[in-house]
Every structure is written in C-alpha cells, then in structure tokens.
C-alpha cells in the first residue's frame, strides 16, 4: 500500500494530466519552493508553481506525465515519469510552435512536512534532448 505522501505526490501528476491545476497545487504550502533545474527557474510560491505548470500546458496542450513511478523515502517522494506532448504553443523564448512531439524522462523530488503538504520540490530533465526533439538543437556527432 502506498504511503500518504506517495498518494499525494501522484495526485499532483494526475491533476496536471486532467488540467486541474488548482488541484495540482492544492497540497503544497503557500510559500512552496520549487526548482526547475531543466529550465533554470526557481518558483517561490504556490502561485508561481501553478503558473509554471500552465506554461507547460501552453507549449504542449496535449502534454502528459506518463509512466509514473514513485519511490517512497518517508518525508521525500521521488517521482520518475516521461513527459510527452506535441509543441503546439509558445514555450519560453520559442514563440513559434514546431508541431513536433517530444518524449523526455523527468525525475522530480518532492519534500513533505509532517502534515503531508509539499514544502519543496526539484525537477530534473534533459533540456538538450528536448531541444533536439523539437528541432531547436542538433544532436552531437560522433
């Protein structure tokens, strides 16, 4: 049986996939710190984190977190998943959508307080692979 923290963590991704961003951020404290290492951004509130999720939806309206796997480490939950979607909207500095599909592995680390609320998160993914898939970068040659 999954722990309460694992259940809470997985519910965030399920809510994102359903486009219920209020539910996705509802289990985080108001002054959550969430570091997106792939984008080099630090979000310092629940509202900023929600806006970052919306940015992903804007860039990939069909984007989903798939193949979810959670690792229970007590007050920390590690979530591995694959982000999949088609770039059909603006994304960061790339205002013109490419129409190309991406499939990129992610690893998120969520930290919980004693009340089971998310207090901090870190996300890691390979931005270079995503840029190659979108056609914004060339793969390395041998």
Image (cartoon, rainbow, N blue to C red):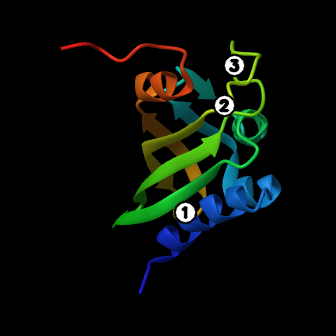
Q: Which mark is residue 9?
A: 1
Q: Are marks 1 and 2 in contact (CB under 8 Å)?
A: no
Q: Mark 1: which secondary structure?
A: helix
Q: Is residue 13 left or right of residue 47?
A: left
Q: Is residue 93 above or below residue 22?
A: above
User: Extreme bottom residue here?
Assistant: 1
Q: In which quarter of the view is residue 48 placed?
A: top right
**Res 44 label:** 2
**Which is in the foreground here, disc 3 or disc 1?**
3
Could you tell which of marks 1 and 2 lies nearer the N-terminus? Answer: 1
Q: Answer few, some or many: residues within 10 Å of disc 3's Cα (few below 14, many 20 plus, some between 14 and 19).
A: few
**C-alpha separation, residue under disc 3 versus residue under disc 1:** 26 Å
Q: Nearer the viewer, residue 38 or 101?
A: 101
Q: Position of residue 9 (x, y in %)?
A: 54, 63
Q: Which residue is mark 3?
A: 92
As measured in the structure, the alpha-carbon distance from the residue carrying label 3 to the one carrying label 2 is 19 Å
Comparing labels 1 and 2, the label whose residue is closer to the camera: 1
């Amino acid at each position: 049986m999954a722990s309460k923290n694992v259940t809470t963590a997985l519910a965030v991704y399920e809510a994102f996939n359903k486009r219920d961003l209020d539910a996705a951020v509802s289990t985080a404290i108001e002054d959550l710190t969430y570091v997106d290492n792939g984008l080099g951004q630090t979000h310092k509130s629940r509202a900023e984190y929600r806006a970052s999720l919306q940015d992903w939806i804007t860039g990939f309206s069909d984007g989903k977190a798939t193949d979810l796997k959670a690792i229970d480490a007590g007050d920390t939950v590690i979530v591995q998943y694959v982000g999949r979607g088609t770039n059909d909207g603006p994304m960061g500095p790339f205002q013109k959508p490419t129409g190309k599909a991406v499939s990129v592995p992610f690893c998120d680390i969520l930290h919980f307080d004693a009340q089971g609320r998310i207090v901090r998160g870190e996300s890691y993914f390979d931005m270079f692979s995503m840029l190659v898939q979108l056609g914004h970068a060339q793969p390395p040659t041998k």
